[in-house]
Image (cartoon, rainbow, N blue to C red):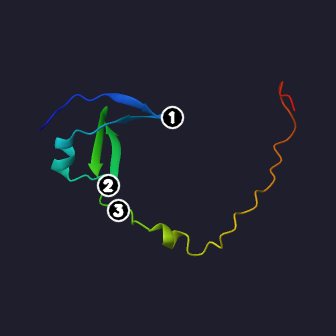
């Protein structure tokens, strides 16, 4: 079993780690791979997922769009509740 020490860094509101190349090559993870993350007895377990995400080209995603941006809808957030200034 290979073991390496890696740093944990802030990534948005969460934390992220970089996976060493030796590990990703050995298990066959690529940039678009999906993984399952779980906890078992205080250990973090990362396993390559059998589930895949189908790549949908942008042209296909936009095929039903008419080119006109949607009108923003008004949302009533209620009146001030603190020291807000309007």
Above-or-below relation of 69 to 29: below
Determine the secondary structure under disc 2: loop
> Mark 1 packing: few (<14 Cα in 10 Å), some, or many (20+)?
few
Assign the N terminus to one quadrant of the image.
top left
Label drawn at residue 13: 1
> In which image quadrant can residue 34 be found?
bottom left
Above-or-below relation of 41 to 50: above
Q: Which residue is found at the position 39% from the left and 66% from the top? A: 54
- Badges 1 and 2: C-beta atoms under 8 Å apart? no
Instruction: State the separation of the CA atoms marked 1 and 3.
Output: 25 Å
> In which image quadrant can residue 55 be found?
bottom left
Q: Nearer the viewer, residue 68 or 78?
A: 68
**76 sits left or right of 17 in the view:** right
Determine the secondary structure under disc 3: loop
Mark count: 3
Q: Which residue is mark 3?
A: 52
Q: Percent x, y for residue 48?
A: 27, 52
Determine the secondary structure under disc 1: loop
Q: Nearer the viewer, residue 38 or 84?
A: 84
Q: Percent x, y for residue 62?
A: 56, 70
Above-or-below relation of 79 to 82: below
Instruction: State the separation of the CA atoms marked 1 and 2.
Output: 22 Å
Q: Percent x, y for residue 19?
A: 26, 39
> Mark 2 packing: few (<14 Cα in 10 Å), some, or many (20+)?
few
Q: Which residue is outermost to the left?
A: 1
Q: Which residue is mark 2?
A: 33
- Badges 1 and 3: C-beta atoms under 8 Å apart? no
Instruction: State the separation of the CA atoms marked 2 and 3.
Output: 7 Å
Q: Which residue is found at the position 60% from the left and 75% from the top? A: 64
């Amino acid at each position: 079993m290979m073991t390496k020490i890696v740093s944990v860094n802030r990534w948005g509101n969460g934390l992220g780690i970089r996976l060493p190349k030796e590990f990703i090559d050995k298990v066959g993870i690529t940039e678009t791979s999906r993984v399952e993350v779980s906890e078992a007895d205080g250990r973090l377990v990362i396993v390559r997922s059998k589930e895949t995400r189908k790549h949908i080209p942008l042209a296909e995603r936009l095929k039903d769009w008419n080119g006109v941006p949607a009108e923003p809808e008004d949302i009533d957030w209620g009146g001030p509740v603190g020291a807000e200034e309007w």
